Amino acid sequence: MSTSQPILTESSSGNNKMLIAMVSIGILCALLIVLTYEGTLPRIERLKAEALEKAIFKVIPGITKTKTFRLQKDGTFLLTTDNPKTATVVYAGYDAQNKMQGIAIEASGQGYADKIRILYGYDPGTQTIVGFYVLESKETPGLGDKIEKDPDFLVNFEALDVSLKTNENMVRHKIVTVKSGSKHNPWELDGITGATISSRAIGDILAGSTSEMVPLIFNNRETFKIIGKEDVNE
Amino acid sequence: MSNQLNKSSEGLFGFLGENPNTDEFIKGIWKDNPVFVQVLGMCPVLAVSNTAENALAMGLATAFVLMMSNILVSSLRHFIPKQVRIASYILIIATFVTITDYAIQAISVELHKSLGAFISLIVVNCLILSRAEAFASKNNIGRSALDAMGMGLGFVFALLCLGAVREILGNGSIFGMAIFPDRFQEWIVMILPAGGFFTLALWLFLFNWVKQKKAKL
């Protein structure tokens, strides 16, 4: 350490060593990650698709098969087989006689802890929401996560009114969450005591999504019905 | 802290001289248990031990990362310059955490959903970095693997202890199977973060009490 010369050479060779070590470890790690990613990707995508499929069957009662429709820019829907990540898609469910039973729609919004992602079933025939399922939520266990399993709350989604105003592209009554036990109208959601914010969040997510999607789907409801037998996958 | 740990394991060696390998393995489970004795990695211990299943999955994921990173750190110990060792260890640990993340997603989407952000947080679990720094960087691959296996199992054991108590009292079930009649009123607090602290305190008390009793004998 007495002269500067040896320190310089030592540190530059040390620098090279450090650089080589870091870069080679970096390359090794990157290689390992890419290999795992490539190896697990097909299975992960299949599992995610299966989970979504299961959820669709839950939110539209009595169906045996589903079809994916993509929302186009002009507000109409088109049958699609690929699964584009950027486009808005809805899922139509059919019973054994190929009769359309309802449409499953994905929606999301801010909950108490984090974003909540839900899937709900809409029946254009009765103009009601017929099913509801939480795809993703980080709500407080024991309190906020009651939105997923509280039977008194889930009863709300057996026939929740989202009918349109006559000759207008608007939902007649926006869905609103009311205090637990004070539901009087078919468009009201009975909230959960102890999970006020979470149950209100569900009401807001549904109100936002239905006011946008329900008029579009209702006006295009014939699109979903005209599926011939040959078009529907068993 | 790391020096102290290393010394204690070396001191143990002198005492038990004959079977160093068994000792390397056993110390993580009992004598130097990462949770009950070293009190390392408390964030996942408190956060993900709300059910026995989550605790087991989190414990196994951590044990896997610990095992793989210990082996790799040990095999590269002569190659990594001292100045960049911590950065290198973090890089290696982060790699195996990412691999674990993909693996868990491929095993079950539901499980991945319930473990949430805590898988990524294994990177900053000080248990793993401390074993890399205090043990794997100074010992051969075989002993590092044994050390990781012992510490990993000790971590799984500790998480299961917490998870089982919290799930039984907080949800009336164990591994998802109900064990109490319907009348049982769940102690919601046990599933919430506060319950984690209570349970940890009880286990620490019990563990130290048993240890002290043993030492007196």
Image (cartoon, helix red, strand yellow):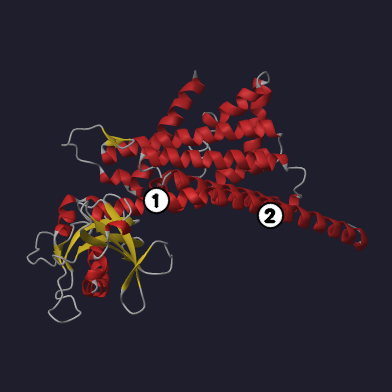
Residue with the most extreme bottom position = A167
How crowded pointer 1 is (Cα within 10 Å; few <14, some 14-19, many 20+) is rated as some
- Residue that label 2 marks: A26
Locate residue B118, reporting x and y percent. 46, 50
Closer to us: A31 or A226? A226
Horizontal side of residue A11 vs B126, given as left or right: right
Locate residue B69, reporting x and y percent. 62, 43
Q: Are marks 2 and 1 on the same chain?
A: no
Q: Quadrant of the N terminus of chain A?
A: bottom right
| Residue type at numbered disc 1 | Lys
Task: Name the residue at 73% across, 42% down.
Answer: B77
Residue A85 can be seen, yes or no: yes
- Distance CA(mark 2)–CA(mark 1): 29 Å
- Residue that label 1 marks: B113
Identify the mark at residue B71; answer none if there is no mark: none
Residue with the most extreme left position = A184
Task: Name the residue at 41% across, 30% down.
Answer: B206
Q: Does dot 1 land on a helix, a strand or a loop?
A: helix
Q: Quadrant of residue A73?
A: bottom left
**Chain letter, disc 2 residue:** A
Locate residue B164, reporting x and y percent. 36, 35
Residue A145 can be seen, yes or no: no
**Chain letter, disc 1 residue:** B
How crowded pointer 2 is (Cα within 10 Å; few <14, some 14-19, many 20+) is rated as some
| Residue type at numbered disc 2 | Gly
Tell me: residue B117, above or below residue B207. below
Task: Name the residue at 14% across, 82% down.
Answer: A167
Horizontal side of residue B209 vs A77, given as left or right: right
Locate residue A185, reporting x and y percent. 8, 67
